[in-house]
Image (tube, rainbow, N blue to C red):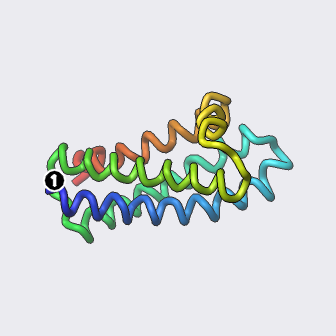
Amino acid sequence: MVGPALRAGIAYAALAYAAGFVLGALRLSLLAPRVGELAAVLAETPVILAVCWVVCARMVRRFAVPATAPARLAMGGVALVCLLAAEVALAAAAFGQAPAAFLAGLVRPPGAVGLAGQLLFALFPRMQLAWR
């Protein structure tokens, strides 16, 4: 159970991060200057969540993650930890932002919307059990 869930979680996070990186660049460069940061995040969130839903289902199949709540929650938990670690690393490397400053940004409205989306992302493997 742990092996497939771990591998699937890492792959799920990597693919979601790549998609989020591209969408985030478009959001920051094209959308946010026109409509503001919060509106841009609100527009991006459903798109990235739709992408993540599809990616999640594919990773569950590819890594044969068992159709049990513990396995699916493990996959989502691993994915969330990997995703947040990658975001903290990017914030530090690209923007010189300390981890504490990154975390403080999660209480502002745009950050809170993003965090809510990430929590949904982490629950997708478990949620998809209901749609099998």
Residue 105 % position (x, y) = 66, 35
Q: Is 82 in front, or is 67? A: 82
Horizontally, is 33 left or right of 61 in the view? right
Q: Is 117 in front, or is 107? A: 107
> How many neighbours does mark 1 have within 10 angstroms: few (below 14), some (14-19), or many (20 or more)?
some
When the figure is inspected, residue 67 is found, relative to residue 64, above or below; the finding is above
Residue 111 found in image quarter: top right
When the figure is inspected, residue 47 is found, relative to residue 102, above or below; the finding is below
Please name the amino acid that badge 1 sits on: Ala
Seen at 41% across and 48% down, the residue is: 81
Residue 97 % position (x, y) = 69, 46
Q: Secondary structure at mark 1?
A: loop
Q: Is 28 in front, or is 103? A: 103
Total marks placed = 1
Residue 74 % position (x, y) = 26, 48
Horizontally, is 103 left or right of 27 in the view? left
Specify the quadrant that holds the N terminus.
bottom left
Seen at 38% across and 46% down, the residue is: 122
When the figure is inspected, residue 17 is found, relative to residue 41, above or below; the finding is below
Seen at 40% across and 63% down, the residue is: 55
Seen at 21% across and 63% down, the residue is: 4
Horizontally, is 75 left or right of 48 in the view? left
Residue 52 % position (x, y) = 45, 57
| Residue lying at the far right of the rendered structure | 34
Horizontally, is 46 left or right of 30 in the view? left
Dot 1 corresponds to which residue?
Answer: 67
Residue 127 found in image quarter: top left
